Image: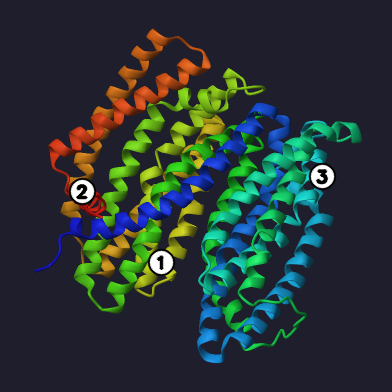
Amino acid sequence: MTQSPSQHTGSIARAAGAMSVAVFASRILGLVREQVFAGLFGAGYAIDAFVVAYRIPNLLRDLLAEGALSSAFVTVFAQSEQRFGLARTLRLANNVIVCFTLLVGGIVLLGMISSSRLVALMAPDFSLIPGKHQLSACMTTIMFPFLLVISLAALAMGILNNRGKFFIPALASSFYNLGSIVVGVSLSLVMPRFGFQPIVGMACGTLVGGFLQLAVQVPLLYQVGFRPAWVFEPGDEGLRQILKLMLPAVVGMSASQINIFINTFYASSCAEGSVSWLNYAYRLVHLPQGLFGVALAVATLPLVSKLAAQDNLPALKKACVSSLSLGMAVTLPAACGLIVLAEPICAVIFQHGRFTPWDTEQTAAALVYYSLGLVAFSGVKILVPVFYALNDTRIPVVGSFLTVAANLLCINLTLTALQHRAIALSTSLSMIINFLFLAVILYRKVEGYPVGHLAVTFTKTLAASLLMSLAVSYAHATLSAWLGGRLLPQIITLAGAILVGLACYFGVLSFLKVSELQELAKQLRAKMGREALS
């Protein structure tokens, strides 16, 4: 008897739930960091300059350090230990650290020297506003070493994960956020005494946060037997294998970095504050993306990889559809909620200090357009691992570059009319196009999957989400009229509207008998029953 798609939901949901807890902590600290920025600097001149300065080394960080490098290193490190033992593997680790320190260090040095040219390339219109280009270039120079530090932190995480240590490496990114907040705020208060703008202190805080992310892992490295040593063997087989594994990952990830470059380039030509509004809005939509889309992807990969290895294509297809259905069930209401409550959410989180009601309005407008692509983002994150499990890395790369082309086309068609909102809209539309492309190709590749089940789940979830939106809108308007508009009443109103929306959504889904929700509820009841008996 074959399993229905919903029967895979329990294992996927349990794994995704554990992952979501860790992601949630990181996202919350990141959101606190953005609140600090909003309160101290608002949206405009200083934050625009900071965002561009931070994105330049961060593009390379996403491309090299925490993406391609870490995954390739973990794979080769594990294989080396099996074949050659721990001592030789730790020597390989030192060789990788030395070689990448020299390589990335050279990139950092070149980037610091070329910071002014890089800012001119990414945000050419900054030069039209006195001092904005120079401020961004100054902070780019300060933050470029962050690339080297975070690369070393990624390698440390790889070593520790292979030695069975996960908690401290997972916690390390929280130290980055804490360091950048505490040190950044402290330095921003004293920077004017030395002739620098306060925002420069936040750039220094970012660099210190990166050092903390590395430093917190160092004691554990010693505990697992690693000792730093000068090993420079550029011809080593293990190092070559890492570079070989990195290459396709770098090519595949380069598309998303090109999109970030394109978005920043066009945003810098819009009204002052556009880069900031888009950054704040993306941070908000990034929370459900990380909680649901990324967590579901991480949970799905082991299952579909196992099924692919067993050559169990029917089960793989149903597991994929189950993940997509569960993704819809959590991201579609999240998207609708963000659209309906965009302005009150932005007001409660950001509208303090220098962040004005106008900034709230513009950030909320970007958030609405970003939210349109939330379901597609989750879908892409789920489908890409399925292609990897089927040993097809080409199609996800093609999809990524199709996204770049679609993004560029959409921006040019809508920028004049929508300004910064065009960038958020084009991001969502290009992600939807990528999702549809991957879904169609996968359907052909595996000779069909249960589209009917997916369509039924989508229809029911959409109906529940729309009814939820009406309930949320009514509840928020009613509570606002009763409680008034100060901060505490705003928080209570927002929380009350969200609770009403959740009750309405799950009530409608239960009435419509969505199989994924029923299976998830069954797993939760079973877990609570086991805990009650223990």
- In terms of depth relative to the viewer, which is nearer, 348 or 45? 348
Question: Looking at the image, do the residues carrying marks 3 and 2 touch, with CB atoms under 8 Å apart?
Answer: no
Q: Mark 3 vs mark 1: which is more N-terminal?
A: 3
Question: Looking at the image, do the residues carrying marks 3 and 1 touch, with CB atoms under 8 Å apart?
Answer: no
Residue tagged 1: 395
Judged from the image, the secondary structure of the residue bearing numbered disc 3 is: helix
Residue tagged 3: 138
Q: Mark 1 vs mark 2: which is more N-terminal?
A: 1
68 shown above or below 284: below
* Local crowd size for mark 3, using a 10 Å CA cut-off: few (<14), some (14–19), many (≥20): many
- Nearer the observer: mark 3 or 2; the answer is 2
Question: Looking at the image, do the residues carrying marks 1 and 2 touch, with CB atoms under 8 Å apart?
Answer: no
**Disc 2 residue type?**
Arg
- In terms of depth relative to the viewer, which is nearer, 83 or 1? 83
- Seen in the image, is 107 located left or right of residue 367? right
Residue tagged 2: 525
- Residue shown at 63% from the left, 67% from the top: 220
Distance in Å between CA atoms under marks 3 and 1: 40 Å
Distance in Å between CA atoms under marks 3 and 2: 56 Å
Distance in Å between CA atoms under marks 1 and 2: 40 Å
Q: Position of residue 455 (x, y in %)?
A: 20, 48
- Residue shown at 77% from the left, 41% from the top: 136
- In terms of depth relative to the viewer, which is nearer, 192 or 395? 192
130 shown above or below 402: above
Quadrant location of the C terminus? bottom left
Can I make out residue 270 in this image? no
**Disc 3 residue type?**
Cys
